[in-house]
Image: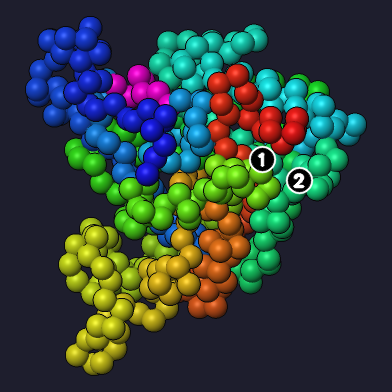
């Protein structure tokens, strides 16, 4: 269950009441119902190593999009269990030559101060650009993590978690090392593009002379309020993705997603591990398939996400059901069949990705796909076994390409008066 110290999302009624001066008068029922909508979390089904994507966000009137607020301080860092955000930036930094533990601590202190202010809808502490001057917090979240190389750069090798060992190579990998890994990783998400960009610039400026950008990627999802009712969102292949993501209400959610206290190592208590993959979708090839062929690749109906074995979106998949010819209704190499936890020793992860589109290549091919981000207490028990299984025969692998990869240790949330990572850097 979520930690009680983390504020819950506001209801549409409370949001509208606040926008009307607290009384709720002057806001028509038509205005409330006509603008209510929500997105679900895009499932990284288009990317390997898929677990399940986060639950759909609560319906919210469009007028309340800017007023949504996530809290910086808490048991866990923000940006993990919150609903899908409309705009995202992923950015990795490397410490500069000569920068060590002292410089890293000062940088995390600056970043934490900036994150707390921006998430509250306030100006950056130094030289604010005014890009987000007219906007509310817009559910902004900033999440910070450490890569494998960070510990050698700061003399903290003995504090490097075993779970942060480099991921194994997979046959589907075509990784660009320049866009992979990094000493430090920052995830930025918001429901407004200008608010997200404002945070990105503030974080980059705060890095100063201590760290330089290694790589940076931009993503997006459906904006809250864009649908008439809460629903699972679609990825760029048009598939409903996110039907079976672990939910905070699940009895074993915390066990699967977060490192338990006291933690191993201790500074990772209540933290999580993020696997980040840039997964290109070969959309021209995918869109040449018939609807029936696309559904066979995934194992679910495109219209409503229901399994090919029948029922609705949340109906359990019947893997043994056969057709009149005696063939499995859900093909043996269907993506949804292969990624099921009960087919992977119970391996599961919380997926919270963004779609991306980085233009069109000279040959007219779109450079588009998924910025896959998944969370788990141990990637060797979450991401790795599922990706290995996908490597051996996933029908979807023909239509995707893994182009970048990273693994980051994301410590627990900062308590009041602390900065993120303080227990590591000052422990």
Residue 313 falls within the magenta-colored stretch: no
Q: Nearer the viewer, residue 121 or 165?
A: 165
Tell me what residue is drawn at x 42 percent, y 78 percent. Answer: 333
Name the residue at 19% across, 23% down: 13
Segment tinted magenta in the rendering: 64-70
Please, what secondary structure does the residue beneath circle 2 have?
helix
On the picture, is 85 further left or further right than 125?
A: left
Q: Residues within 10 Å of mark 2 (few under 14, many from 20)?
A: some
Whether residues under marks 2 and 1 lie with C-beta atoms below 8 angstroms apart, the answer is yes
List x then y, in percent, for residue 171: 63, 71
Mark 2 = which residue? Answer: 159
Closer to us: 404 or 376: 376
Q: Is residue 317 left or right of residue 139?
A: left
Name the disc covering residue 215, or none.
none
Q: Residue most toward the front? A: 262
Residue 4, visible in the rendered structure: yes
Residue 414: quarter of image: top right
State the residue lying farthest toward the left: 29
Question: Which residue is nearer to you in this view: 425 or 175?
Answer: 425
Of callouts 2 and 1, the N-terminal one? 2
* Picture residue at 10% right of the left edge, 18% below the top: 28
| Element carrying mark 1 | helix
Pointer 1: what residue?
267
- Left or right: residue 412 versus residue 79 is right
- The relative height of residue 156 versus residue 246 in the rendered view (above or below) is above
Residue drawn at point x = 48 percent, y = 72 percent: 345
Quarter the N terminus occupies: top left
Where does residue 263 sit, x and y in percent of width and height? Answer: 61, 47
């Amino acid at each position: 269950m979520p930690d009680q110290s983390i504020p819950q999302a506001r209801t549409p009624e409370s949001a509208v009441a606040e926008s009307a001066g607290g009384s709720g008068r002057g806001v028509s029922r038509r205005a409330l119902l006509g603008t209510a909508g929500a997105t679900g979390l895009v499932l990284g089904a288009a990317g390997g190593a898929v677990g399940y994507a986060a639950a759909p966000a609560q319906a919210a009137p469009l007028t309340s999009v800017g007023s949504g607020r996530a809290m910086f301080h808490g048991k866990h860092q923000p940006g993990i269990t919150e609903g899908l955000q409309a705009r995202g930036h992923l950015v990795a930094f490397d410490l500069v030559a000569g920068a060590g533990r002292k410089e890293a601590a000062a940088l995390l202190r600056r970043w934490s101060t900036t994150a707390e202010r921006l998430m509250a809808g306030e100006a950056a502490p130094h030289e604010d650009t005014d890009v987000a001057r007219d906007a509310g917090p817009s559910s902004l979240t900033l999440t910070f993590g450490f890569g494998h190389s960070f510990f050698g750069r700061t003399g903290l090798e003995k504090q490097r978690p075993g779970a942060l060992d480099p991921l194994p190579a997979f046959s589907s990998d075509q990784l660009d090392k320049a866009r992979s890994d990094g000493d430090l990783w920052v995830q930025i998400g918001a429901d407004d593009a200008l608010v997200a960009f404002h945070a990105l610039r503030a974080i980059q400026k705060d890095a100063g002379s201590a760290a330089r950008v290694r790589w940076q990627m931009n993503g997006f999802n459906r904006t809250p309020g864009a649908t008439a009712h809460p629903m699972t969102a679609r990825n760029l292949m048009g598939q409903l993705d996110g039907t079976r993501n672990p939910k905070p209400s699940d009895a074993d959610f915390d066990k699967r997603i977060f490192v338990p206290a006291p933690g191993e190592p201790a500074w990772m208590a209540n933290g999580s591990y993020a696997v980040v993959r840039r997964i290109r979708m070969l959309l021209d090839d995918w869109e040449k398939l018939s609807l029936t062929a696309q559904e066979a690749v995934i194992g679910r109906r495109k219209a409503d996400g229901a399994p090919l074995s029948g029922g609705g979106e949340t109906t359990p998949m019947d893997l043994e059901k056969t057709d009149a010819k005696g063939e499995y209704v859900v093909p043996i190499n269907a993506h949804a069949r292969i990624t099921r936890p009960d087919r992977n020793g119970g391996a599961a992860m919380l997926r919270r990705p963004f779609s991306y589109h980085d233009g069109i290549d000279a040959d007219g091919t779109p450079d588009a796909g998924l910025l896959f981000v998944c969370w788990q207490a141990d990637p060797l028990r979450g991401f790795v076994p599922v990706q290995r299984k996908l490597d051996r025969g996933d029908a979807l692998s023909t239509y995707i390409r893994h182009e970048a990869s990273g693994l980051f240790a994301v410590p627990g949330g900062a308590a009041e008066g602390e900065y993120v990572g303080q227990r590591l850097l000052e422990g």
